[in-house]
Amino acid sequence: MYMADFVLARKSRNLTASAVHIFLNILLGVLSVLITVFSSSPVLGILLVLISKWRVFAVRSRYLWLNIKSNLVDFIVGLSVVLLSFYAGNTLMPVHFVLIALSIVWLLFIKPLSSENATFVQSLCAVFLGISATTIMTANTEAIFAVLLAFLIGYAASRHVLSQTSSKDYTLTTLISGLVFAEVTWLCHSWAIIYEFSVPIETGIRIPQAAIILTIFTFLFNYTRQAMIRLQDDFRFKDNIGPMLFGAGLIAILVLWFSNPMFNI
């Protein structure tokens, strides 16, 4: 009898804890955007994101940098949502509700996953949102700021995938990925193309071309790497060329036919 009561009490506590966890994540997703919009400043939203990650900082100093590196992708997504909300303006628009939804989906459904495919998706989210925020935020600044932020995003996205799936030293690969991101961002910075979606109403949704290009690159890079690991000696480029050609074709179409100055900021 007592054992049954104990099991029921434990299940009740687990359900309560789960409900509280879900509520707090939804609250974080909503407040991080709304507090940024209504305060007309990203400071409070950024502080809210950092406070939500207090466990990252609540460690001994020798583990702090390792903890930060391990959570870079989560930081990039959270901070990017805040910055994109800020640069969309201080009047509520459809883009703000889109960012709230994206933030909640990230916190509840994408971030908690730990499978190989999940880390792949997490890195793509960080690249798309991170490069979008970087491009919009640094549009009127020196290129060095965009290049440094892009390097960090490329490094973090690559490290996030490799640290989960590789037992070998992946430092060189992550640095190369960061350099590719920096180079592409530097090339795009002087001709920053941003696609706006404002028909039939003003939505505030703006997607930088660089974000699409680097998200496709991240997909191709990780897809090829996973295929090489899975097939090993049986790997043949000709057997996996379809996705590569498709991705390269999309990038070519964007650069050649959708780089009209009418989108230029």
Image (cartoon, rainbow, N blue to C red):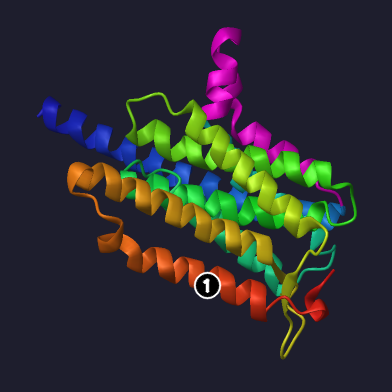
What type is the residue that disc 1 sits on?
A: Leu
* The one of 160 and 86 positioned closer to us in this rendering: 160
Q: Decide whether residue 200 is among the magenta residues.
A: no
Side (left or right) of 83 relative to 106: right
Q: Is residue 112 visible?
A: yes
At x 13%, y 26%, the residue is 2
The image shows residue 244 at horizontal and vertical percentages of 41, 63
Give the overall secondary structure of the magenta segment.
helix
Q: Which residue is mark 1?
A: 250
Side (left or right) of 153 relative to 147: left
At x 49%, y 27%, the residue is 171
Q: Is residue 67 above or below residue 5?
A: above
The image shows residue 86 at horizontal and vertical percentages of 80, 56
Q: How many marks?
A: 1
At x 58%, y 77%, the residue is 253
The magenta stretch is 41-70
The image shows residue 185 at horizontal and vertical percentages of 71, 52
